[in-house]
Image: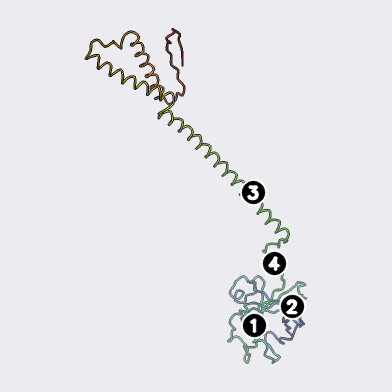
Amino acid sequence: TIMLTPSPGVQPEFLATVEPVSTDASSQQLSLPFELVLDGYTREPWSSGMMTHNSEDTSGWKTCYLLSTDGRNRLPGFLKYLRDRKKACVAKFNDSTASTRAILVVPFDPPPIPSEQLPAGVDKTQLLYVKYLADDRVLSRGKKPAIDPNKQLQIEQQKLKEKQIQMQQQQKIQRELQQQRQKQMTQQKSVSQSTSSKKGIGGGILGNLLGAQQKTQNHLDVVRAKRRNNDLTPDLTSGAAGAITSFREKVAADLEKFKSDNGTFVTSINFISFAGEFCTY
């Protein structure tokens, strides 16, 4: 007799009275109790009827057909319920012959019924294809042990913490690299401005000296031109005028040399004052 529990916590109801049907394709003997209670559902791969039928390694599964003999015709509706929801119905019980916990499965996808191997007069609508496993511990072999939820939460929190630390380290490295780049750019800009200001001097003491030297040179050119036309013009290349001219040319040469040398930032000018003292500026 097969009983069926409609939902958890509800008393099981009668489903069918059955007896095994012997066929050439299914002649295995099952050790079943007088009364079975189908009280669970599953979609696990091992519950598939076609998978067991097509697989060479059945992992200890036995199969057979059970024929309803009560005349109540309740099996077709039950099997349709399983097909529509694509899940199998399960019963677990103690196997008295093997002293183990056995399991019986009614798949939603049974293999085709071998009509030519059925006894004469058997109604195929009253057949129930079942799978039987003498020890349900076989199903747990090869599975990973269940992880405690609290431990799993701790593992996830630790992974998240490590990820946050890694991100913080990466951000710190990026900030340091950016600061180094900014420092290098500032130094380069400072050197460039210093060099540019030195090369393009247009004002200040050096600019004034160079400008004054140019004006003096222009005046002397004018005087020399007049001297060629007037022999009475003083000779600016001798005496005090010659000394001033020589000193001016020397200062101009020193200033031009200083201006063209990018590696020198300080220079000195030596000359003799009108008081006869030697000075350096």
Identify the residue at image location x=46%, y=30%. Answer: 194
Considering only order in the chain, which callout, 3 or 2, is on the residue closer to the N terminus?
Answer: 2
How dense is the environment of label 1, judged by Cα within 10 Å: few (below 14), some, or many (20 and up)? some
Residue 140 disc label = 4
| Residue where numbered disc 3 is placed | 165
Considering only order in the chain, which callout, 1 or 2, is on the residue closer to the N terminus?
Answer: 2
Q: Amino acid at mark 3?
A: Ile
Q: Amino acid at mark 4?
A: Ser
Labels 2, 4: front one: 2
How dense is the environment of label 3, judged by Cα within 10 Å: few (below 14), some, or many (20 and up)? few
Q: Amino acid at mark 1?
A: Tyr
Residue 34: % across, % down? 76, 83
Residue 81 disc label = 1
Quarter of the image where one finds residue 41: bottom right
| Rendered image coloring scheme | rainbow
Residue 43: % across, % down? 64, 74
